[in-house]
Amino acid sequence: MMELVWPSIEYLPGYVDALERGWSPDTVRGEAAAREIQARISADAAGYVASLVDREAKGDPVKLPDGNIVSRLPGFYQWMWDGEFCGSINFRWQRGTPALPPTCLGHIGYSVVPWKQQRGYATEALRQLLPEAKAEGLPYVEITANTDNLPSQKVILANGGELVERVPKPPGYPPGEMVRFRITLR
């Protein structure tokens, strides 16, 4: 049984092991982001873990794949756990509106470690996270996936996602198209 847990020092060794094995919570920046995270953990593990829950957007700005820096949104990460670390899911939003800035690909992102994929963990993590999004007052969330990422699209569809549009990736990201889905929060 997979559950979402709040990031903590207790679960950090599994997270670090996943990073060392080549996984990254950042599906766009991948290995570069993993190296930056490892350096932050080495410098201040407790501070890094605390930074993963930032409902007030007080943390450092966010680095886009092209190196540009943008303001942080309120948000948090939760970790997938089945007795060991399985991946992460994150949620970000703007207070008072369901809209996101054009540099943000969606309200929710997730990544399962390769050795735990195809077990339904991303689908279950998204299902467990949606009540948190509703609690923030959002009427819906938007989630994007690369056009060729059919497993991610299945996760979104399994949670009530409806295809909104196919669009080019915004400036700051590698070129290509993505699909945008919307999940109405009930």
Image: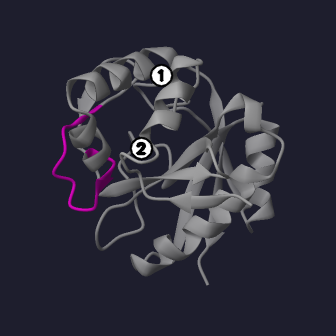
Does 177 sit left or right of 34 as displayed?
right
Q: Residue at x 46, y 29 (%)?
A: 16
Does 44 sit left or right of 35 as displayed?
left
Mark 1 or mark 2: which is in front? 1
Is residue 174 visible to the viewer in this orientation of the structure? Answer: no
Between 67 and 57, the one nearer to me in the picture: 57
- Alpha-carbon neighbours of circle 2 within 10 Å: few (<14), some, or many (≥20)? some
The magenta-colored residue range is: 51-62
Q: Is residue 55 magenta?
A: yes
Secondary structure type for disc 2: loop
- For the residues labelled 1 and 2, the Cα–Cα distance comes to 14 Å
Q: Amino acid at mark 1?
A: Arg
Expressed as whole percent of the image width and height from the top left, the position of residue 154 reads: 81, 50
Does 157 sit left or right of 73 as displayed?
right
Q: Residue at x 75, y 38 (%)?
A: 116
Up-down: is 62 above or below 129?
Answer: above
Q: Amino acid at mark 2?
A: Cys
Q: Main secondary structure of the magenta part?
A: loop
Expressed as whole percent of the image width and height from the top left, the position of residue 186 reads: 61, 84
Expressed as whole percent of the image width and height from the top left, the position of residue 44 reads: 21, 31
Task: Please name the residue that numbered disc 1 is placed on.
Answer: 29
Q: Is residue 70 magenta?
A: no
Upstream in the sequence, badge 1 or badge 2? Answer: 1
Expressed as whole percent of the image width and height from the top left, the position of residue 123 reads: 73, 56
- Alpha-carbon neighbours of circle 1 within 10 Å: few (<14), some, or many (≥20)? some
Task: Please name the residue that numbered disc 2 is placed on.
Answer: 104
Secondary structure type for disc 1: loop
Is residue 132 visible to the viewer in this orientation of the structure? Answer: yes
Query: Quadrant of residue 184 in the image?
Result: bottom right
Q: Are marks 1 and 2 in contact (CB under 8 Å)?
A: no
Q: Residue at x 73, y 44 (%)?
A: 152
